[in-house]
Amino acid sequence: MKEGPDIARIASLVGDPARANMLTALMDGGALTASELALEAGVSLPTASSHLAKLMDGKLLTVASQGRHRYYALSGAEVANMIEAISGVAAHSGPKRARPGPRDKSMREARVCYDHLAGDHAVAMFDRLIAQEIIVRDEEGIRLGPAGQVFFAAIGIDTSTLGASRRPMCRACLDWSVRRSHLAGSLGTAILDKILAEKWARRPTGSRVVEFTPPGRKAFEKLFLA
């Protein structure tokens, strides 16, 4: 075997259709039971349990017990970023499909990618933050720019606190629907939290879609796209 990470093992875990459906169902950052994931995957509960055991063994999922139930979730943002990137490749190179309906249009516009905003709005925001040098992108990756701390402090996001975390503050995440980057990391999470806290948008139950209200869309665009 060649040296380096065992890509084939992870690829085989993600490549099974039932397991892929389970992982995608957890891309909203939530946790589901084995029964709920069985429904998402379209398999029986015993089959789902077998798949979940493999995903757990591959460290792609974590599980937490609460009362009689066990709740499964993605093991971290790295797994979510991988699924998002694979989705982008699949959308680009997969079989041609009929034009997506309204539900798919909503997913393209704005959705949750684990714990941050994705879709058209997120990509446009990322581009604008870079254009204004609030975020800087170079060979080493992306980081907060000279104007970043002041900009975010003015809207109630303390980047000094985010910077103290072991988690990267800024990270580029490949957006599957746009095939360009949006902002992940602790800063991406803080921005999504602000959007929801300000009630600019809401998350319908059981969906990854982020629905902006008309006033909320205007506020978002004024702050991040103007």
Image: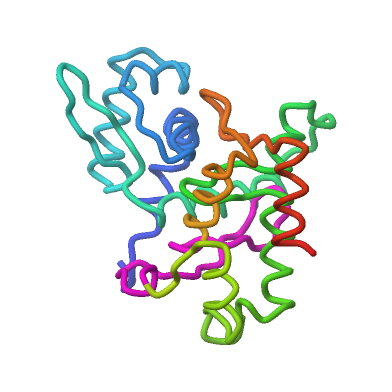
Q: Is residue 9 above or below residue 215?
A: below
Screen quadrant of the N terminus: bottom left
Asked which quadrant contains residue 160, the reply is bottom left
In the rendered structure, the answer to whether residue 214 lies left or right of residue 200 reads right
Position of residue 24 measured from the top left corner of the image (x, y, whole percent): 49, 36
Position of residue 65 measured from the top left corner of the image (x, y, whole percent): 17, 28
Q: Residue at x 32, y 14 (%)?
A: 45
Q: Residue at x 15, y 20 (%)?
A: 67
Q: Residue at x 52, y 77 (%)?
A: 149
Judged from this view, the residue extending furthest toward the right is 99
Asked which quadrant contains residue 214, the reply is top right
Total marks placed:
0
In the rendered structure, the answer to whether residue 101 lies left or right of residue 170 reads right
Q: Residue at x 67, y 43 (%)?
A: 110
Position of residue 79 measured from the top left corner of the image (x, y, whole percent): 41, 51
Q: How is the image coloured?
A: rainbow
Q: Is residue 64 above or below residue 68?
A: below
Judged from this view, the residue extending furthest toward the top is 44
Depth check: give the residue in front, 81 or 158. Answer: 158
Position of residue 179 measured from the top left corner of the image (x, y, whole percent): 70, 57
- Does the stretch in magenta take in 166? yes
- Does the stretch in magenta take in 177? yes
Screen quadrant of the C terminus: bottom right
In the rendered structure, the answer to whether residue 101 lies left or right of residue 172 reads right
Depth check: give the residue in front, 169 or 173. Answer: 169
Magenta stretch: give its range: 161-187
Depth check: give the residue in front, 105 or 179. Answer: 105
